[in-house]
């Protein structure tokens, strides 16, 4: 009898894959069996992508975004407006705003939002780092792009409070009816925000 | 400027995770960002689970199931009935039948089902290996547990044709109304099979 290894590699792979959020044992089992039907290099390549992510990724000391380099490509791009900084909750949000193509400034990643119920106060976020950036004098406007929910609203209000005394302009993303949504089907809060934020024509 | 690595490890991880069936770029991005928020060993452990799966898993030369050893734990279990072999399409099916606790024999994994439209004929399946096992004389009954669909039915018929002349008993799993399903909600084919397979009381 030739033992390829003593423990059960299939069970081990399923256990490991199930650690991903939203992947239960059933899906993990499906993925593991799929891997077994692929050429061996597929598993090796996927494993490498996962492993290297955590080895290679650090944080940009300026904008606090996750990045493979410090400063990150956005912070070292000379064509970006250094006077305009968009503040977001999570690294993912940078991608969403970049995809819009409408922001030519830089970013600041807070790493969350103020949420007293979860024990997250201003000190748990990268607000100190933001204040230091503003203190260095180059920034004219902070666009707050936190989520339109209780935590995002609280964070936006807090930021306006601490930033305005430093002489910087603080704005927030407009909220209203999403482009492409018929008013009939828009959710109640979006309609309310759209009315509040109505503009002269 | 300190480059952690030249290529973008986040994009690389997302590309690799998207190779899994049913995981699109959106989900892959969510998983990658989740990994970035975990302690570094989480990514290393998951990567190891994936990588080792393909390194450690081979096939049992007897039953053709994927296995970490050859022969597999089921084929080398002396308490199993060697005269009774359950034939399934896929390695996953072994798990389903094992979980029922109702089969005390061994298995044979065909690695698919006859499907002329997909170019899968008897020669593409592990039928030669099954005939060799039957030829060695120990097997008295083959329980065909292929799926109750066109391909599974065709495979079952083919197996009956080639196995019966060898003097072995060939049976097939009963199909009918699933336990727990009310007749009102049972699908048409299951009701039809249940009527066909009705038993004396």
Image (cartoon, coloured by chain):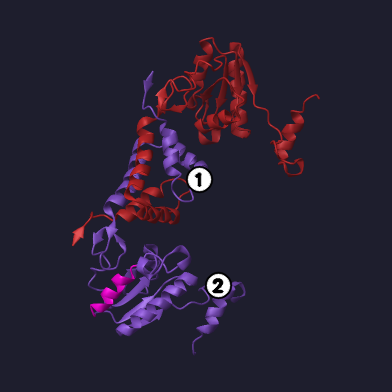
Chain colours: A red, B purple
Q: Nearer the viewer, mark 1 or mark 2?
A: 1
Q: Are marks 1 and 2 on the same chain?
A: yes
Q: Quadrant of residue B133?
A: bottom left
Mark 1 lies on residue: B24
Q: Chain of mark 2?
A: B
Q: Residue at x 43, y 43 (%)?
A: B17
Residue A83 visible from this viewpoint: yes
Looking at the image, is mark 1 or mark 2 earlier in the sequence?
1
Between A66 and B65, which is closer to the camera in this rendering?
B65
Q: In the rendered view, tell whether residue B157 sits above or below residue A55.
A: below
Residue B150 horizontal/vertical position (percent) = 49, 71
Residues packed near mark 1 inside 10 Å, few (<14), some (14 to 19) or many (20 plus): some
Q: Residue at x 51, y 77 (%)?
A: B176
Residue projecting furthest to the top:
A137
Q: Horizontally, is A19 left or right of A125 in the view?
A: left
Residue A111 horizontal/vertical position (percent) = 49, 29
User: Between marks 1 and 2, how big is the CA–CA gap?
Assistant: 34 Å
Between A106 and A101, which is closer to the camera in this rendering?
A101
Q: Which residues are magenta?
A: B126-137
The dot on residue A51 is: none
Q: In the rendered view, tell whether residue A201 sits above or below residue B116.
A: above
Q: Residue at x 39, y 18 (%)?
A: B1
Mark 2 lies on residue: B181
Residue B77 horizontal/vertical position (percent) = 24, 69
């Amino acid at each position: 009898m030739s033992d390829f290894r003593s423990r059960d590699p299939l069970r081990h792979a399923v256990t490991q894959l199930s650690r991903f959020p939203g992947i239960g044992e059933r899906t993990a089992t499906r993925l593991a069996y799929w891997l077994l039907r692929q050429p061996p290099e597929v598993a090796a390549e996927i494993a490498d992508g996962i492993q290297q992510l955590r080895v290679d990724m650090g944080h940009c000391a300026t904008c606090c975004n996750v990045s493979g380099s410090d400063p990150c490509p956005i912070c070292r791009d000379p064509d970006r407006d250094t006077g305009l900084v968009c503040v977001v909750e999570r690294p993912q949000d940078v991608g969403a705003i970049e995809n819009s193509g409408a922001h030519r400034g830089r970013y600041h990643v807070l790493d969350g939002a103020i949420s007293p119920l979860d024990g997250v106060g201003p000190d748990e976020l990268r607000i100190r780092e933001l204040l230091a950036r503003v203190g260095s004098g180059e920034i004219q406007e902070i666009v707050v792009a936190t989520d339109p929910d209780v935590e995002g609203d609280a964070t936006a209000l807090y930021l306006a409070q601490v930033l305005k005394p430093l002489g910087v302009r603080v704005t927030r993303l407009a909220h209203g009816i999403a482009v492409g949504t018929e008013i009939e089907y828009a959710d109640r809060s979006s309609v309310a925000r759209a009315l509040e934020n109505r503009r002269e024509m």
